[in-house]
Image: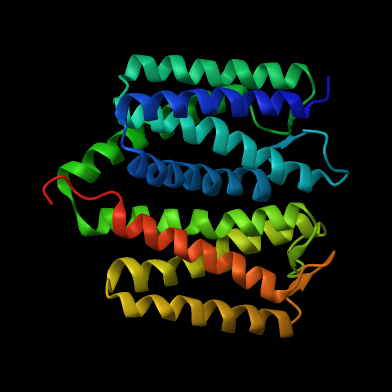
Amino acid sequence: MPKIYWYYGLVIIGSIMLIYTVYKKKNIPDIISFFSFTTAVSWMIEGVILFILDAYAYKPGLFQDPFAENIIGHMIANTALWGSTAILVMFFQISNPWLCFVSVSFMLIEEFFLKIDAYEQNWWKTYMTGIGVFLFMLVMKKWYSRFYRNGHKLHRVITFWMIAWFFIKIPTSILTVLGKVFYNVDWYDNIYRSSALYGAFVYDAFMASIFTLFVSVFKKTYWCIVPIIIIVVGDIFLYYMDILTFHNGWNLIYLIIFQTLSLGLFILCEKFTLKPLHN
């Protein structure tokens, strides 16, 4: 059986958890926003562990390049499994003993993927995943309860910064793994690795800050035009500096359209979801 099918299995497991949460809690807009938030946090943490520290490698078997493999495996595993599980934990406020069960489940899945050679560890150990899962889920559970209980503005701004980062990161990650858009910064010999890190921790982080500032902090609708201007100017600047490169029929206009759509999704989430209960 092709290894990618086992990754599809993670998507099925995650989808079941997500559908169950939606069925029980009904609050689809908030679930979407918190799902984006939790997935973004998991992406960012693993970005350090996987792409900087080179702790392990995903092997879905779709690409020749090992870091292209890492990007797609990272996106599937974190979005399908970590994000969906975190939503279940947050909305149902799962108890700590059950969090231990979740951690063991993640370790068993990891060991299975090792056995079928769909994943390999460099210096990483499976018990580290167990510890990481427990701490991650515990923090997400506390974050959710304090978000609604305290209604603190900084809490909300951080949450929406992560959501903005997620919406910006999705198109650039997909376009990179498809070989259409790269950031040519030469941080590493591998262009997928360099591009993923520059995109995540420089460009996407900067744009997320712009989105959050002009949409979440300033609030007035007319400020929303500023991020669009910055997207256009920023992309043109990076393109003419030969940092932003396009391949396989892609171009600057297509990228700007995708990024503008990301901004639109973020505005909808910010305006219509995650309202403090006392409001």
Q: Quadrant of the N terminus?
A: top right
Residue 188 point in image, percent of width and height: 77, 60
Residue 38 point in image, percent of width and height: 44, 42
Left or right: 149 as drawn, with respect to 66 = left
Residue found at the far right of this picture = 64
Left or right: 219 as drawn, with respect to 106 = left
To which quarter of the image does residue 149 belong? Answer: top left
- Residue drawn at x 59%, y 59% is 200
Foreground: 13 or 268?
A: 268
Q: Quick check: 119 above or below 215?
A: above
- Residue drawn at x 72%, y 42% is 70
Foreground: 131 or 195?
A: 195
Q: Quick check: 10 above or below 43?
A: above
Counting the numbered discs, the total is: 0
Residue 187 point in image, percent of width and height: 73, 64
Q: Quick check: 260 above or below 43?
A: below
- Residue drawn at x 46%, y 19% is 102
- Residue drawn at x 50%, y 23% is 16
> What colour scheme governs how the chains and residues are painted in the rendered image of this protein?
rainbow
Q: Quick check: 220 above or below 7?
A: below
Foreground: 134 or 212?
A: 212
Left or right: 60 as drawn, with respect to 261 = right
Residue 46 point in image, percent of width and height: 58, 43
